[in-house]
Amino acid sequence: MAASSSSAATTNIMLAIYEKKTSTLDLYRPLRNYISFNYSDREAQNLEDDLQTLKQLRSDIERIPDPSPPARRDLFISYFKALCLVENRFPISPDKDHVNTVTFVWHDAFKQKQKSSQQNIHLEKAAVLFNLGAVYSQIALSYDRTTADGRRQASHAFIAAAGAFSYLRDNESTKASMGSSTTVDVSIECAGMLERLMLAQAQECVFENTIAKGSTSGVCAKISRQAGLYYEEALAALNVAPLKDHFDKAWSSHVQLKAALFCAEACYRYSLELHDKEEIAEEIARLRSGINALTEAKKSSKGAAAQLLDAIVKLEANLNHNLDRAVKENDRVYLMRVPSPSSLPGLPAFSMVKPMQMHEVLDASKEKMFASLVPDTSAKALSRYTEMVDDVIRTQAEKLQQGSELTRVRLKEMDLPESILALEGNFTLPDNLKEDVEAVQISGGPAGLEAELQQLRDLRRVNQELLVQTEELLQKEAAEDAQFRSQFGTRWTRPHSATLTKNLQDRLNRFAANLKQAAESDTRIERSVRDHSALMSILDRRPIESALPTLSRPIMSLDANEDAIVGALKQSLRQLEALGAQRAGLEDMLKEMKRKDDILPKLMTSTGSYEDLFRKEISKYDHICEDIAQNIEAQEQLLMQIQAQNEQFSAVFNLEDYKASREKCYKQIQAGIAKYREIKENINEGLKFYVTLQDAITNIKQQCSDFVMTRNIQCREMIEDVQRQMAGLSFQDRKSSGPYSAVGQPHQTPRSGSPPQPDPQTAHHPPPSQAPYYRPPEQPAIPGYGPPYGAPQPPAPFHMSAAPGAPFPPPQVQQQPPASHEYGQPAYPGWRGPYYGAQGQQPGSFPRPPYTAQNPYHPPHQSGYYKQ
């Protein structure tokens, strides 16, 4: 019945509830037979795991495999959820078509010889809820209330126990009492009494914590008084039927003493506060009231715990001591008339606890047990009812949406609330226009265009310099080729430079034309920026709203009622906003009602007409439908009122002129945005053009460098070949005539070191034994670049000295890249094919340009890249 706190230092003991006992019951076989008979053997087999789980839970309830209170608590919660699912799917009753072989048997917790036997699942659910509350009370008493954390945990456990008993009283007590036999412990009266008792003990834990923290006497008095009130409510229930003769006398004695103890404690704490205020007369009366309460309680203290009686004795001593002191002070100093205790008003009370809401703890909606088991008739009826609910929800939701859309359109027509905001200086741009302005400002705005124009100039200059450098490479090579051709005459048999570089030169000419056209486009862009700088300057203002016209009060006022007009209009707009918020709440309420609207248990147990049940259930939406209709009607009347007020507002503040000025400013901003975007797009296109062109020029410059390198190697080898020919002729001439110097030795002339002049005859007629230097290779020529010439010979070492008589030292030869075989033998090292349609540039073949393009390359020979 009662258990004392485990803490030896605790002065006051508290009560815990013992669990109800039950008899062994087999739920597995009756439920499986019902599934097989009403559904199929296959369905019964599919639900085997769920049936076994339910069987195990019921067995654990009977056998108590783990006696610890927390484990029992979790077991009762799990089993209660399972019972909720069983209730929805298995009609348990004596009826022939129901599960009629299951009888639940439970003994009374306080008089175990009394028991209840019913074919009613609500008895089982009520008993489980009772035991859940009992276990929570046992958990509460297990905490050490000498510590702050222990008192807090004990209070929470008592609150949970009160929640379990409250849920039992509100949901299952009545249904469990409808059978042929019943017990008092699960009745509405007993559940209510236990709820009050648990709240009293939870409040008592709070009071103990308040004393330990050293709170003021006034606060302690209020908390103590509320604990006494909870105990008094529990005592009142114990003193009337059906509980009067059902509980042991010790229960009544304990609760009565606790009620008197906390009433007297409140008087004692309150008197301390009165003493500090020097209200001696009321202090004396409160102390006497507390003493009287304890005196009356001790008369019926038979069976009470000794610790509780000791606490009463100590408190009574404190009350008498303070009373003696107060009486002496009043007799000697204050001489106030002391009121009678019965004439005093009730002490203030403050509740710090309330029952825990158990709906979420016991919610079985997310459980999967027996989820596939729904009777056909119930499923069809549920589907029909769901359609009826959906029709109501859809119709009402459309009304709400139409009401909101009507408000939006009407307010937009009246230019509200923008005109009110403009009058107060809080006006903003329309969202779409404001987003466009912010995008312009984020990208740099008109002020940032000059930096981008400078990028264009820098890129154009870089391209021009690259183009000039490339042309100079070809020009220098052509000049050297012409010099040797003039020097050696017909012995210089390699192709002319102009023949081999025609296509390269054509491409360079096209690039030069592109650059010239781009420069003209750049000039047009710069001129456009200058011409439209005034138009776009508005976009640089921060905030942009500062550029808008303002709505001002009239310069002259006849009756000075402007503030009243504005105030009335603002008040109406606030009311309209409140109606809109109400509509949003009503829509959420509709969705929540539909979510919670589960009539499946009623359908599965209903024996009457489904139509009658549907009419009853659908009627619960009538109230919210009426609220929606009233909201729409009130909004319509309010909109008519706002329209009349807005007409008066427009007339007083000359709103039409303001709108015209504002629209003009909007157009100016839109025009500035359009021009900025046009210029920005042209600049971006130009940047992409220059970056792409820079890649192309860098590529062709690399090709020209490779071509010049190859020509230099061929030049050196051809010079050596020609000199060997000339040396052979000179040797023959000396043998025949004798007066000539050796090959490579200059003639004895004043100008030493001049290269020997080729012999025209030997130049035109090489020796028969020597093959000509130039021999066309046996592969097709690359289109557009003239006939190919022989593959380059292996380059000479970098330190090779100049051949005697050579006009120039041999150039240092760079390591040649591997020849591409895309078009057969390359025309010269480094050749990679035509620029347009060429393969991607190998990384590292040339330095990256200063700017990178994000979009694909557009061939630079296309006409124009800017929007004109």
Image (spheres, rainbow, N blue to C red):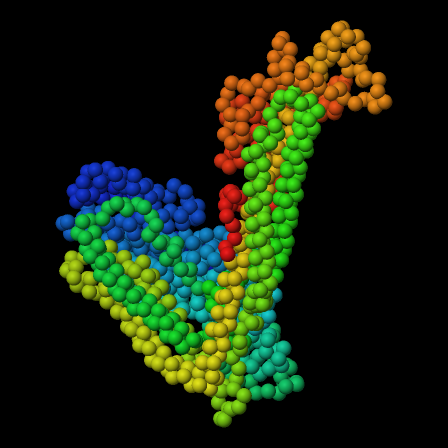
Q: Which residue shows up at 56% across the image and 61% down it?
A: 528
Q: Which residue shows up at 50% across the image and 20% down it?
A: 779
Q: Residue 741's spot in the image, x, y percent?
A: 80, 12
**Residue 286 vertical placement versus 857 (above, below):** below
* 208, 253: nearer the viewer: 208
Q: Residue 150's spot in the image, x, y percent?
A: 53, 55
* 339, 534: nearer the viewer: 534
Answer with the quarter of the image where residue 287 lies.
bottom right
- Quarter of the figure that contains the N terminus: bottom left
Q: Is residue 293 visible?
A: no
Q: Which residue shows up at 38% across the image and 41% down it?
A: 65
**Residue 820 vertical placement versus 852 (above, below):** above
Tell me: 184 left or right of 829: left
Q: Which residue shows up at 14% across the image and 60% down it?
A: 609
Tell me: 453 left or right of 196: right
Q: Residue 100's spot in the image, x, y percent?
A: 18, 48
Answer with the quarter of the image where residue 331 lies.
bottom right
Q: Residue 269's spot in the image, x, y percent?
A: 56, 72
* 824, 598: nearer the viewer: 824
Q: Is residue 201 visible?
A: yes
Name the outermost residue toward the right: 750
